[in-house]
Image (cartoon, helix red, strand yellow):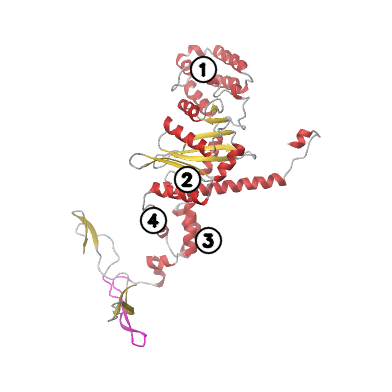
Amino acid sequence: MGGNKSGVKDSETGKLNSLRTYVWRCECHGRPKYRRMVNGRVVTCVEEPILKRKTKKCSCPVMLYGARTKENLWVVKSVVTEHLNHIPTPTKSNHISMFRVRKITQTILKQIENDNDSGAHVAQIFNNLAGRRNGVENIGFTKKDVHNILNRRMRLRLRDGDAVAMINYLDKMTKDNQKFFHLHRLDKIGKLQDVMWVDARSRAAYEYFGDVVCFNSTYLTNKYELPFSNFVGVNHHGQTILLGCALVSHETAERFVWLFRAWLSCMGGKAPAAIMTDQDAAMRKEIRIAMPMPKTRHRWCMWHIMQKFSRKLGSMTDFPQIKVALQNVIYNSLTPVEFEEGWAEVVETFKLKEAKECYKWLVGIDHGISYMALSLREMWIPAYVKHIFWAGMQTTQRVESINSFFDGYLKKNTRLYQFSPRYCKAMESRANDEKSADVNCCRFTRSLVGEFAVERKF
């Protein structure tokens, strides 16, 4: 039911006094009004001239008119109870929006907002609410109502723009914790280009576990075409930890140099002893500029390179045997000399030089990379880098692990203003896993096999 209000004005002040009359009407009262654009202006028409759309307005006469007496009592002056063209019943009240919305309490509203901030879809949120109330029929509102609530909330956040909302959230995080670091760049027209942030926990963790860092920029290219890049390390429990995140508009040398320098500045100028990336030739130059060699040793991910062996050499007749022989030489060679001898033996045994195209790729140039060149073997062959501490990493699997972890929080349709709060929730979950590992490390111990002092120390 809707209503019309009227009051009485005070003769001296001219202000409206307390409510004197009220008219309650059926929600189907009146006739439909259609809006359309005419010469760039919104015009309200009584009837849609082209297409009749569905409407609940059917000029239903049901009403109740009440007035207040001098004794301040309400009296019913007029009432019409016969509905026109429809028969309402108490059970149908759940399908009327004004009654449904009243059933969304502040507790339920907070739960909906928290679930949405955690990355849950509207359907997942609605099903969770239905599960707690033993069925959809006991909720009292619909999935569309949940969608409208979240849409209204999103519009309020995006009044000044999506990117502005994200930067405002990062500024708020910095205000709450001075250790929270973020930096962004805008183009000439004020559009967000690149943004990176590192939370206080990641900065503290880097001081202890910043020897080896793995970097990846291929995860989750979102609707804005901004790849989600991240820096990853390993803690004392062997767990993957996040050391920084960024959204970069273009994967160019200039932008990666800016990102590496900004991240290094955030970490107090302390460069890692070793860094691992995918096999991007340009990345090597960028890291040299941002983190001068030989302070930081750069290594390529072996998995990305080994995958190309199958694609480039798979057409050869005896490829299965060649693959086993190459893997044996690459993984089992203990010294550079042993690798070079084994490699020459494989080339000679399988007559790889006769397969000109395959051999050209194998020892030549592929997208500007000569994998077998002496200067680049030290970038991925284990025998050339085994003397350096890599925290047990030969591939960027650690990054893939953190990417799969973020799959529960971030998606391709995640908007910019949602990135930071969902990132914070993900980090809270990660911190809880580390606390559990700390507790278990104290509770569970290994029995000593011998009486060696070094064994007792470890």
Q: Amino acid at mark 2?
A: Leu
Region rendered in magenta? 59-86
Sequence-wise, which precedes: disc 1 or disc 3?
3
Quarter in which the N terminus is drawn:
bottom left
Select label 2 or label 1 by which is in front: 1
Counting from the top left corner in percent of width and height, residue 18 is at: 34, 79
Quarter in which the C terminus is drawn:
top right
The residue under the point 33% across, 41% down is: 189
**Marks 2,4: beta carbons within 8 A:** no
Q: Nearer the viewer, residue 413 or 262?
A: 262
Q: Which residue is mark 3?
A: 132
Magenta segment: does it hold 68? Answer: yes
Q: How far, Cα to Cα, is label 3 from label 4?
A: 29 Å
The residue under the point 45% across, 66% down is: 103
Sequence-wise, which precedes: disc 3 or disc 2?
3
- Of all residues, the one furthest to the right in this rendering is 451
Q: How far, Cα to Cα, is label 3 from label 2?
A: 25 Å
Q: Amino acid at mark 3?
A: Arg
The residue under the point 57% across, 16% down is: 343
Q: How far, Cα to Cα, is label 4 from label 1?
A: 57 Å
**Marks 3,4: beta carbons within 8 A:** no
Q: Which mark is residue 410?
A: 2
Q: Nearer the viewer, residue 203 or 356?
A: 203
Counting from the top left corner in percent of width and height, residue 228 is at: 46, 39
The residue under the point 50% across, 20% down is: 371
Q: Amino acid at mark 4?
A: Leu
Q: Which residue is mark 4?
A: 156
- Secondary structure at numbered mark 1: loop
Q: Examine the rendered structure and indicate whether residue 361 appears above or below residue 423.
A: above
Counting from the top left corner in percent of width and height, residue 158 is at: 38, 52
